[in-house]
Image: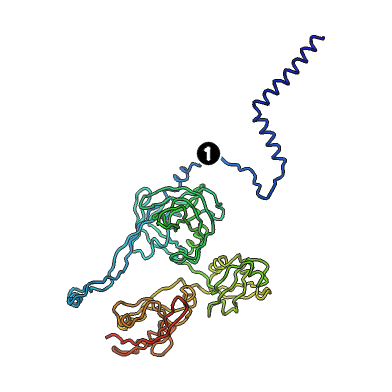
Amino acid sequence: MKKTTIIALSSFFLGILITAFIFMYNPGEEAAELNTSGTENQAPSSSLYASPLQTDSRFPDFSAVVKKVSPAVVSISTERVEKRQVIGFDSPFDDFWDRFFDMPRDKQQEYHSFARGTGFFIDSDGYIITNNHLVENAIKVEVTSLQEKTYQAKIVGTDPETDLALLKVNEKNLPYVELGDSDKIQVGEWVLAIGNPLGLTHTVTAGIVSAKGRIFTDLEQQQPYQDFIQTDTAINRGNSGGPLISLDGKVVGINSIIWSPSGGNIGIGFAISSNLTKSIIKKLKESGRVIRGYLGVGVYAITEDFVKLLNLESKKGALINNVDPGSPADKAGLKRYDVIIEIDGEPIEDGDDLQFKIAEVKPGTKVDLTIIRDGKQKTIPVKIIEKESGLETGPTSSSEKDIGLKVQEMTSNIARRYGYETDEGLIITEVERYSEADRKGLQAGDIILEVNRQKVNKINEMEKILKRLKSGDPLLLLIRREDRRGGSQDFMVTLRMPE
């Protein structure tokens, strides 16, 4: 019995020694368990506390996505005709060239230019999405698929204000890719671009979503309707119009512009969001153009200072800075310092939100605007009209009454868009070189207020005056010229009706 007790005690103390030895020289696993237990029971020490990330240590494999999407991506080649001024040398034989060879030495000549970019099929019937700037004014559009099949494409419709265009080829059962939900994509998610940068067809690049909802006021060609996804995915010239793809194989953006001092990729690229694209493409399919609603106000972002000064509850809404004369807003009685907070009961986040929501209203529709004026809330009904698509030029008269000018009717929308103080009259959009109007110093951008002492606001008003005149009759124009500093000068110019 005594021997048994001694053996038991010896075994007990030997076990303690072995356990202590193991703990001292291999503490990792147990310590980790203790540390984990302590962390689980410990409350976060500050608002900066973040829970552990559940991440896959393996680098993502993009090959399956590329294999799925690539057949729907196409290379686009366009041809357009441009007119350029050709200046020859002074020569006593100029008249000879003009009369006998019909080759004026100092005239506009036509040149053909070519561009390349990217697009992608959005259904099996041959509809293709690309950028407007790639196909604008094109006389020929060719599309080449991954299988190296080439198609002649028709331009179904374009929308310069979002830089989107819809093409179609006469083919069926084509591979296509689906437009996804760009609202669901998160900053930091992986995205891919497939396109034809610098002519290198079907090049794949990868990166992440750097930011969402980017809007710019200093684009070379201003796009009033913007919702850009920023990405560091490598995008270069030739990627325009191609897809920005999420890892589920859906298009979340259409690559459009890059931000670069050199013109090449520096990791700052922008894609038009797929959700904005969906609404534009639907309208282009229906009518070949985008019809937008127009209210006629310029707005400011609401700051904390405005909240205090105008007795507002929050920074949400659109603060009216100016009201276009004759616009729906003007007719409804909206004023500067009014804050629009709702349209038909739907809240307005900011000025951009207001612009998008008004654009979606069908022209001719009446809406109720909830505003705050002098700290009090009120509702004002407004009838929305169609927004003008931009500055379109056209000849002022038939060829026998041509006075060397092209004009467009000035409107409050054009005046606001191009920074004019004057919103009436006819704006000169082109002056024919070497015409009498050119010799008298008239310029594109000048505004014709009166013709033969009669006010003109419509092209047909000017045409009626011209039709009453005979060859050689004098013509008196009252012109207004504005400068960028906000000043203006009115002056008179006399022309002679052409022989």
Q: Is residue 207 visible?
A: yes
Residue 38: name its quadrant. Answer: top right
The quadrant of the picture occupied by the C terminus is bottom left
The spot of residue 89 in percent (x, y) is 22, 72
Residue that protrudes farthest toward the right in the picture = 1
Q: Is residue 397 left or right of residue 269?
A: left
Q: Is 325 above or below relative to 119?
A: below
Residue appearing at x 46%, y 82% in the figure: 424
Amino acid under disc 1: Arg
**Colour option used:** rainbow
Identify the residue position indicated by label 1 in the image. 58
Which of these two is toward me, 325 or 447? 447
Q: Is residue 131 left or right of residue 150?
A: right
Residue 95: name its quadrant. Answer: bottom left
Q: Is 120 above or below relative to 20?
A: below
The quadrant of the picture occupied by the N terminus is top right
